[in-house]
Image (cartoon, helix red, strand yellow):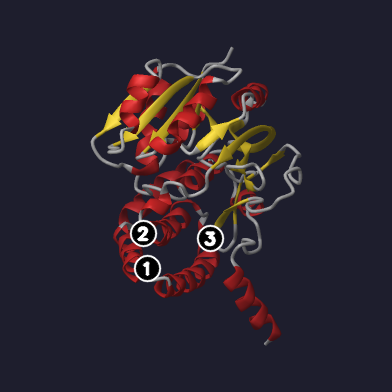
């Protein structure tokens, strides 16, 4: 039987961590569970030590973000000789057969590097993600988010990426393409890893029989302006690292327009300073991003045209301001 490791990054998640860990302990396919604590001050690390002594705990003295909170667990999965590693949000709960279905798919499909599950909101009334898409606007989005037809996407199909909140990675793939880029800290590091997997020739597949439930934004809402800062910092980095040169500038001008509107909305919401910091940090990271780009593009195994065919040639459904602006332009 395949050996799987589940990695739970945690930062002050005491309110929902127990439900998460209980669901993982109740899996029909038993994983090795690792909690990576990012310097929590709410007693959640102590909760793991006292109530869950059989769960491996890795403790940080500070918050290293989602990427820094998952990578130590992925490294342990490699050390343990695991076949698969699954990042799993501390505010998520897995159906008892979640891991069994994901591992069964990767066992049977050796060209697949990532298996995405059906991720629902906490009460199971709406979809959160059925795989990630990436658009020609440089904007990723989770397929189906906010929709209440839970069976709409029940076909097993290839997708561009998988949510880092609850997905399964082949360890062999991670050894080839690397782990999460910790420069992202949080937001879009999972899309970046999926993009690198696609460039390296690995497939990403949505497995609808694997189901988990996610309390959307439970961690990010704790810090004012956090999503604004991370979005404006990370979206240009995601594009510049991974987009084939032939299409890079075609996507860049669209992303510039999208970020201009996003910046204006941030100002209206009182997040001006977070938005400015995000743009400044994006520019500051440009040199290191280009260094990473050279390695990624030099070692990739698929054509420019394949990547272009995997993108959504439209705006994300939730980009309402951009939809309105485009409609005005078309009328003119």
Q: CA distance from mark 2 to mark 3?
A: 25 Å
Q: Residues within 10 Å of mark 2 (few under 14, many from 20)?
A: few
The residue shown at (56%, 64%) is: 137
> Which residue, as the protein is rendered here, is positioned at the far top?
1
Residue 71 versus residue 77 in the image, above or below: below
The residue shown at (69%, 81%) is: 330
Please state if 187 lies on the left or on the right of 317 as rendered. left
Residue 97: which quarter of the image?
A: top right
Residue 178 versus residue 284 in the image, above or below: above
> Which residue, as the protein is rendered here, is positioned at the far bottom?
332
Along the line of sight, the residue nearer the viewer: 194 or 111: 194
Residue 108: x, y in percent? 68, 22
Q: Which mark is residue 138?
A: 3
> Can residue 210 be seen at all in this image of the molecule?
yes
Mark 3, secondary structure of its residue: loop
Dot 1 or dot 2: first in sequence order is 2
C-beta proximity under 8 Å, tags 2 and 3: no
Q: CA distance from mark 1 to mark 2?
A: 8 Å
Residue 76: x, y in percent? 38, 23
The residue shown at (41%, 56%) is: 234
Question: According to the image, label 2 marks what residue?
Answer: 224
Residue 288 versus residue 205 in the image, above or below: below
Along the line of sight, the residue nearer the viewer: 276 or 281: 276
């Amino acid at each position: 039987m395949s050996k799987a490791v589940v990695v739970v990054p945690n930062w002050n998640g005491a309110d929902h961590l127990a439900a998460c860990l209980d669901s993982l302990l109740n899996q029909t396919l038993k994983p090795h569970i690792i909690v990576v604590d990012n310097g929590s001050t709410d007693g959640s690390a102590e909760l793991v030590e006292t109530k869950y002594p059989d769960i491996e705990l890795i403790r940080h003295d500070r918050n290293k973000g989602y990427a820094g909170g998952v990578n130590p667990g992925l490294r342990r999965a490699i050390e343990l000789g695991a076949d698969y590693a699954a990042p799993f949000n501390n505010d998520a709960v897995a159906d008892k057969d979640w891991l069994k279905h994901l591992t069964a798919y990767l066992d049977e499909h050796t060209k697949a590097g990532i298996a995405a599950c059906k991720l629902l909101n906490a009460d199971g009334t709406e979809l959160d993600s059925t795989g990630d898409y990436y658009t020609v606007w440089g904007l990723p989005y989770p397929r189906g988010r906010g929709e209440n037809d839970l069976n709409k996407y029940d076909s097993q199909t290839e997708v561009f990426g998988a949510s880092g909140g609850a997905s399964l990675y082949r360890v062999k793939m991670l050894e080839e393409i690397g782990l999460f880029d910790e420069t992202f800290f949080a937001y879009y590091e999972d899309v970046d890893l999926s993009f690198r997997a696609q460039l390296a020739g690995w497939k990403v597949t949505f497995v609808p029989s694997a189901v988990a439930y996610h309390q959307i934004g439970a961690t990010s809402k704790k810090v004012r302006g956090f999503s604004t800062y991370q979005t404006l910092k990370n979206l240009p980095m995601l594009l510049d690292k991974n987009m084939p040169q032939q299409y890079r500038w075609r996507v860049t001008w669209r992303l510039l327009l999208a970020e201009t509107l996003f910046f204006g909305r941030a100002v209206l919401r009182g997040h001006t300073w977070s938005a400015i910091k995000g743009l400044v940090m994006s520019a500051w990271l440009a040199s290191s991003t280009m260094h990473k780009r050279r390695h990624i593009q030099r070692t990739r195994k698929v054509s420019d045209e394949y990547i272009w065919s995997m993108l959504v040639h439209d705006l994300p459904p939730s980009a309402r301001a951009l939809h309105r602006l485009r409609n005005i332009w078309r009328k003119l």
